[in-house]
Image: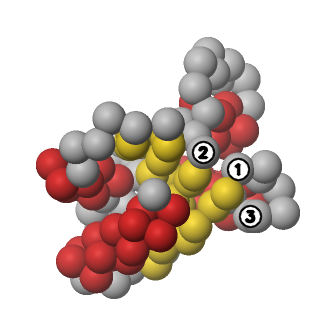
Amino acid sequence: MTIISLEGIIGVDKTLYLKRLEQEYHEPDLRFYENSPYILNAIQPGLNLKVDWVPNVIIYLFCSPYICHSHVNRNTNPLDHLLDLHTRYEIICDELNCPIKIYKVNAQEETDTVYRNIKDIIDKIH
């Protein structure tokens, strides 16, 4: 079974891409998730989520916190919080710091381009 986790800060449109992937790929040996407990625990120490699954592959959707800030509710997700999350993701999702294979996708491009890049990764590994 191949488990792929889409990772990235709030406002990077993980849910949008996840829904598109789930509509397109109907293979029983391929699962998609958003924000694995493995990465969330690493990014937010003290969260202590139960890690009952670990992805085989992480697709990290990189996007500037300033762009993501324009996509989210600014009252509940202040820019300082997004900047901090972005820094933590960059550290954790660095290939040298993570034992899981990571692919980085520039999520600052057009939505269809980002989706095609994600699909290219999935088709390459699966």
User: Is residue 126 in sight in this rendering?
Assistant: yes
Left-right relation of 22 to 87 = left
The disc at residue 100 is 1
Number of the front mark, 1 or 3: 1
Q: Give the amino acid type for the residue marked by disc 3 in the picture.
A: Asp
Residue 62 appears anywhere in the view: no
Query: 73 or 12, which lies in front?
Result: 12
Quarter the C terminus occupies: bottom left
Which secondary structure lies at badge 3? loop
Where on the picture, by quarter, is residue 72?
bottom left
Q: Which residue is tagged 2?
A: 56
Q: Which residue appears at 46% of the width and 78% of the height?
A: 106
**Element assignment for label 2:** loop
SS for dot 1: loop
Q: Please report the residue visible at 73 percent of the width from the left and 31 percent of the height from the top.
A: 45
- Marks 2 and 3, Cα distance to the nearest angstrom? 16 Å
Label 3 belongs to which residue? 94
Q: Position of residue 73 (x, y in %)?
A: 27, 50
Residue 113 percent coordinates (x, y): 28, 82
Q: Is residue 90 placed above or below 16 in the rendered structure? A: below
Callout 1 crowding tier (Cα within 10 Å): few <14, some 14–19, many ≥20: some
Front-most of 98 and 108? Answer: 98
In this view, 102 is above or below 55: below
Query: Reading the chain from its start, which is encountered first: label 1 or label 2?
Result: 2
Please, what is the three-letter code of the amino acid marked with disc 2? Asn
Describe residue 112's horizontal placement relative to residue 109 as left or right.
Answer: left
Give the residue at x 72% y 23%: 46
